[in-house]
Image: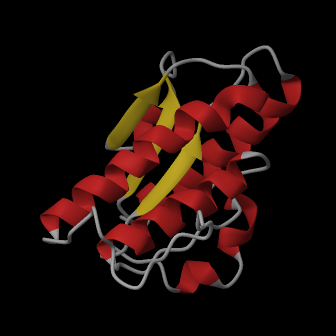
Amino acid sequence: MGRDIDYPIAMEGALKLKEVSYIHAEGYPTGELKHGPTALVNEHLPIVVLATQDRHDADSMLRYGKTLASIREFVDREIPVLAIVSETDSQVEKIAPCILRVPEAPMLLQPIVEVVPLQFLAYHIAVLCGRNIDQPRHLSKSVVIE
């Protein structure tokens, strides 16, 4: 899940996980996860949260605070949370048991550093599931060179 600019990155991470591991995943806006989909979330369904921040951007810090509250809520309900955070983050590590740190970046560049760990996560899950990550089934190139 992700807020604002992180929502499309959450969708991309879910897509990559589906493509290579054949596990159903969905990207959701962090604020909307409390409506409807939260009924499906339980201790057997991990949540990956994009929780980076740009300390020089007031809007980014506001979104970060709201995301932090969502993480607390899920952890309190004993839902497994993997949070992707900025390398200097000191708040999420106090509440989420699993974190991945990415380099600090301005808000508009954060998706570049966030998508890489999501791709690695999809890769490693696919390998653990015994999937052939070099030839995912039923996928074809969208651009064909003639």
Residue 24 position, x and y percent, is 43, 81
Q: On the picture, is 14 further left or further right than 125?
A: right
Residue that protrudes farthest toward the front in the picture? 146
**Residue appearing at x 68%, y 59% in the figure:** 30
Image spot of residue 92 (x, y percent): 48, 35
Q: Is residue 95 above or below residue 49?
A: above
Residue at the (69%, 47%) spot, across then down:
6
Q: Nearer the viewer, residue 143 or 4?
A: 143
For residue 8, side relative to residue 83 (left or right): right
Q: Locate the C terminus by quadrant.
A: bottom right
Quadrant (top left/top right/bottom left/bottom right) for the N terminus? bottom right
Residue drawn at 86 percent across, 24 percent down: 58
Q: Residue at x 70, y 56 (%)?
A: 8
Q: Position of residue 105 (x, y in %)?
A: 65, 19
Q: How many marks?
A: 0
Asked whether 102 or 80 is in front, the reply is: 102
Q: Nearer the viewer, residue 51 or 110?
A: 110
